[in-house]
Amino acid sequence: MEGIILMRKLAIATASAMLGVALSLSSMVPAVYAAETVNCDAVMQELGQGKKAKEVAADLKISRSSVYRCKRHAKNAAKAAEKSSMGTSEKMGNAAAAGAMPSPATSK
């Protein structure tokens, strides 16, 4: 009888220890991720100076894939900005053209 009680206590203690280890490891993951955030502005500035991705990665102590990711984000942002400005200027052009044309009711 005492053996069973001892085994249950041991099982509970082991499970508690494993839960504690699991929780401590899960709390470390966001800290590691936060340490790996990349300043894409600095990356693009370095690339703008004519450096290659490998050099930028070594200078900023990041991976080359992070450099390429920053380049891809900058390219997508430029496309979105261009698309946005084209849509705005096209709408303005259509509105100006509509205003310049006489309305059918006034022209005879």
Image (cartoon, grey):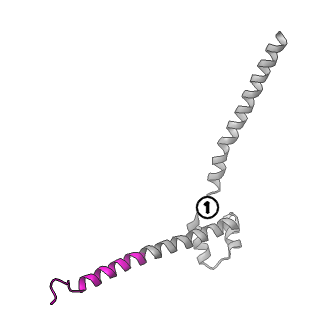
In which image quadrant can residue 4 be found?
top right
**For the point 24% across and 82% down, which residue is it?**
99
| Residue 38 visible | yes
Residue 24 location, quadrant: top right
Residue, far top: 1
x then y, percent, for residue 101:
24, 86
Q: Residue at x 61, y 58 (%)?
A: 37
Give, as a three-letter code, the residue at label 1.
Answer: Val
On the image, the x and y values in percent for residue 13 come to 75, 24
Q: Which residues are magenta?
A: 85-108
Indicate the secondary structure of the residue bearing disc 1.
Answer: loop
**How far from the left and from the top, in percent, is residue 19?**
71, 32
Percent x, y of residue 25: 70, 41
Give the dominant element type of the magenta stretch: helix, strand or loop: helix
Q: Is residue 89 magenta?
A: yes
Q: Which one is in front, 36 or 76?
A: 76
Q: Is residue 88 magenta?
A: yes
Q: Is 76 left or right of 54, judged from the image as shown? A: left
